[in-house]
Image: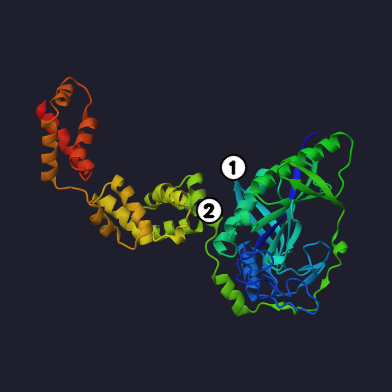
């Protein structure tokens, strides 16, 4: 029998706020153990939380970007459970009235457009972290307690690990576009839990789901899903039944193990948090949130394909980076350069520089105006494409104009016909063997052009050199 996987995801993203969700402690990653703490985030008796307004703003922003209905009135709830890094023994989250509901996320898998529905987006506080050391034992670091999260819960609309990965990549890119999460996977900024079930192919009934936790990378999610689908098929094929349970994924051993059995919402004894008032988003606030949402990744991908004639890979690589996409669009809007020419520079030399230097585009001095000037100089024949590659590093590193860099480096292309003709004639005079080979029917054009470029110190206009060289060779018979 053939089986179909049914997959739902719960994606947690840390929000890029300066302070935590319910106190003024810094939310910055990487501080010394238990240095970003206070009575509120460590759950001291009598301490009172105050909701960070920016958390609500960011959560609603993500909701609008994913087509959700934003509940203009929502509340905070207590989710009760015990864990050593949860000092209050409850987490402040949202239960029956989340800030966002009923959204849709579109993405592409092998050229086919897919849609995964979002059931909800809610904000909540993160728990602390257990640090295990063979010598010192286990330490509880409360720095992460109270770091603001949004949790995005999907409907069971995904049917393969490939679909899950593309969905996750789209969520990550959207968060980056909105500038509400730093998306640093190595710092745990995005994490996910995966719910997996199987059913006979063609069936519409949902099977018994198994939740997997401890998934910190998208590639790990792929491995976890593939393992669990295979495990469930094996259980069913051997006459067993799938139990509703939570399992821990081990990405080193490439297997999962049982953490706890069946778990439902009532186990957490949710109730409204009595210390926090309801959240109301008025029209002015909603308008401000809406005004901050840019053209999103999938829309840009489709526009680059349809309007700029890019391949799927080119459009994907550009639309995946907000900074690169903005650079391209600014160049295209100028009307001075062709979008394809700007895209070629961004995808090749600009991306290579950023990768080699391990820097972000916004941290350099490269601007759209500089890129436009570079391309215009090449199109006019003022500099060669090879010279442009030499100019580019300085464009990243200095405030000089492109023209000033070209002048300083002596890269202005020689396009004076008289000067080029003199170079061509001198090269021919110094290369009698090449002339003899030409008369014998051999192709020596490439060699002679190279000699002319060398004689011009790389500044000769290649098109003019080719043209004048052809004319002179014809004269020689």
The quadrant of the picture occupied by the N terminus is top right
Pick out the residue farthest to the top. Answer: 440
Pick out the residue farthest to the front. Answer: 135
Q: Point out residue 170 in the picture as x, y percentages from the top left corner.
A: 60, 54
Res 73 quadrant in image? bottom right
User: How many numbered dots are placed on residues in this image?
Assistant: 2
Res 286 quadrant in image? bottom right
Residue beneath label 1, please?
110
Dot 1, crowdedness within 10 Å: few (<14), some or many (≥20)?
few
Relative to 175, say whether 19 is above or below.
below
Q: In the depicted view, which residue is nearer to us: 118 or 189?
A: 189
**Measured Cα–Cα span from mark 2 to mark 1:** 16 Å
In the visual, does 469 lie left or right of 366? left
Relative to 464, say whether 307 is above or below.
below
Residue 320's disc number:
2
- First in sequence, mark 2 or 1: give its number: 1
């Amino acid at each position: 029998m053939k089986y179909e996987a049914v997959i739902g995801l719960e994606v947690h993203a840390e929000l890029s706020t300066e302070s935590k969700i319910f106190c003024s402690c810094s939310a910055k990653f990487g501080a010394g153990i238990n240095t970003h703490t206070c009575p509120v985030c460590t759950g001291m008796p009598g301490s009172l939380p105050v909701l960070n307004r920016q958390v609500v703003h960011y959560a609603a922003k993500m909701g609008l970007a994913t087509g959700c209905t934003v509940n203009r009135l929502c509340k905070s709830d207590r989710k009760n459970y015990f864990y050593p890094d949860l000092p209050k023994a409850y987490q402040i989250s949202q239960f029956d009235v989340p800030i966002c509901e009923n959204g849709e996320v579109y993405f592409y898998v092998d050229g086919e457009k897919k849609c995964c529905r979002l059931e909800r987006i809610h904000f909540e506080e993160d728990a602390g972290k257990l640090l295990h050391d063979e010598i010192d034992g286990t330490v509880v670091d409360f720095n992460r307690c109270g770091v603001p999260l949004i949790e995005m819960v999907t409907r069971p609309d995904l049917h393969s690990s490939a679909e899950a990965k593309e969905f996750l990549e789209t969520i990550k890119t959207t968060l980056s576009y909105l500038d509400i999460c730093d998306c640093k996977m190595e710092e745990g900024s995005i994490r996910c839990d995966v719910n997996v079930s199987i059913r006979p192919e063609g069936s519409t009934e949902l099977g018994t789901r198994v939740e997997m936790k401890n998934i910190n990378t998208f590639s790990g999610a792929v491995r976890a899903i593939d393992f669990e689908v295979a495990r469930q098929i094996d259980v069913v094929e051997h006459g067993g039944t799938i139990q509703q349970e939570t399992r821990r994924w081990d990405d080193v051993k490439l297997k999962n193990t049982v953490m706890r059995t069946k778990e439902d919402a009532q186990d957490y004894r949710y109730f409204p948090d009595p210390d926090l008032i309801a959240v109301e988003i008025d029209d002015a606030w909603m308008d401000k949130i809406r005004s901050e949402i840019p053209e999103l990744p999938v829309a840009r991908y489709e526009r680059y394909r349809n309007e700029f004639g890019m391949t799927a890979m080119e459009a994907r690589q550009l639309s995946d980076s907000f900074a690169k996409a903005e650079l391209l669009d600014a160049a295209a809007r100028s009307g001075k350069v062709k979008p394809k020419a700007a895209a070629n520079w961004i995808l090749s030399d600009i991306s290579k520089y950023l990768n080699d230097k391990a820097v972000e585009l916004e941290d350099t001095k490269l601007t759209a105006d500089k890129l436009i000037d570079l391309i215009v100089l090449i199109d006019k024949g003022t500099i060669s494409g090879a010279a442009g590659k030499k100019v580019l590093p300085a464009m990243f590193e200095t405030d000089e104009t492109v023209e000033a860099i070209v002048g300083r480096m002596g890269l202005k292309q020689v396009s004076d016909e008289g000067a080029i003709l003199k170079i061509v004639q001198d090269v021919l005079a110094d290369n009698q063997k090449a002339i003899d080979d030409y008369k014998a029917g051999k192709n020596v054009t490439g060699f002679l052009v190279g000699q002319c470029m060398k004689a011009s110190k790389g500044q000769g206009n290649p098109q003019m050199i080719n043209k004048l060289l052809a004319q002179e060779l014809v004269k020689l018979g």
